[in-house]
Image: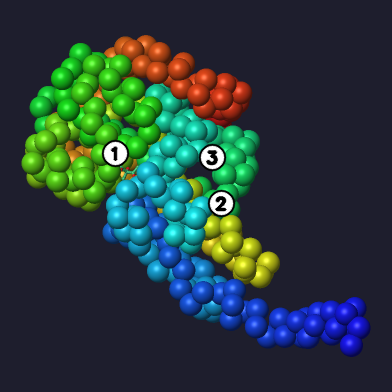
Amino acid sequence: MKLRTFLGLTAAAAALALPALAPAQTYKSEYRMSLVLPPSLPWGKGGELWANKVRERTQGRINIKLYPGVSLIQGDQTREFSALRQGVIDMAVGSTINWSPQVKQLNLFSLPFLMPDYAAVDALTQGEVGQRIFKVLDQAGVVPLAWGENGYREITNSKRAIHSPQDLKGLKIRVVGSPLFSDLFTTLGANPTQMSWADAQPALASGAVDGQENPLYLFTGLKMHTVGQKYITMWGYMADPLVFVVNKEIWNAWTPSDREIVRQAAIDAGKEEIAIARKGLIEAGQPMLKDISALGVTVTHLSPQERETFIKASRPVYDKWKNQIGADLVTLAEKSIAARKK
Ligand code: X2X
């Protein structure tokens, strides 16, 4: 047989064989979704909503198992993005903070006092900034599908009410993965210690650290008042969005119609999750704060002047990180916020 004929036959055989083999080879029986927090809290709930919608809308073609506590990477949340890229994780709902060591643009959301209110958060994630960040994530090797929200990270501690940077002096504060946080808390006069969320909980319980910063649903959900966290200051210095993403190879193996289902499910779940994450904080009288005060916790609201003192004190960190993130992107964010609908 001539070589060309042989190749032709082989190709024809392969073409015939492929359609039958493809589905079995390309769809896994179960996909692994990484989450930091479990479905009992808004973040994990967002992941669960996404997984359930996908299972229902694909009639079970795509089954997803949740791995809260970032257990696929032994709790080391700052490795989540690399693990996603490498395929150790198939999909995730992750915080911009935890991925910012690998994707410097994500530090945008951590710039102190950039986003004064929820409308500012939405102006970024739902606008041109959000689209640009999705391009960056795509270039970094994952498929971004939708935004969710962890939330405004209020500062809590066991020692005293915080009204000014002075009050932070000497307080041991647990901080998250990006060096921006160590920079900021050092600049404000505190004593920051970087650790994973898994390590933070025992550190708070034993008093190894005096305080932490996180959305308040974590405060109530984990009963932080029972481990001595008696003071909360509503300083609203930053809020971390969540991003719904899929590993690229996994994504490419799905049919176009299944990809569309997964994308739409992420968008729907993201919207629902954001509403859950803001519950108790956006209604008149902020019912969540009433519940927290009732636990014997002192909730401090900053006066406009006190807030201004924090903004001024953190400005060097803002300026330094504006350059590291990319001045263009930060300027676009500043303009988008200035133009927001309140
Ligand atoms: O570690 C944290 O503080 C948490 C749970 O908020 C994140 O994963 C960013």
Snapshot quadrant of residue 329:
top right
Q: Is mark 1 on a helix, strand or loop?
A: strand
The quadrant of the rendered image in which ligand 1 is seen is top left
Q: Residue at horizontal 43%, vertical 65%?
A: 32
Q: How many marks?
A: 3
CB at disc 1 and ligand 1 closer than 8 Å:
yes
Q: Mark 1 highlights which residue?
A: 214
The answer to whether mark 2 and mark 1 are in CB contact below 8 A is no
**Residue 278 seen in this snapshot:** no
Q: Is mark 2 on a helix, strand or loop?
A: strand
Q: Mark 3 highlights which residue?
A: 125
State which tag comes first along the sequence, 1 or 3.
Answer: 3
Q: What element carries label 3?
A: helix
State which tag comes first along the sequence, 2 or 1.
Answer: 2
Q: How far apart are marks 1 and 3 (CA)?
A: 20 Å
**Dot 1 alpha-carbon crowd within 10 angstroms: few under 14, some 14 to 19, many 20 or more:** some
Q: Mark 2 highlights which residue?
A: 142
| Colour style of the rendered protein structure | rainbow
Name the spot of residue 16 as percent of width and height, x first. 77, 85
Q: Distance between the residues labelled 3 and 2?
A: 17 Å
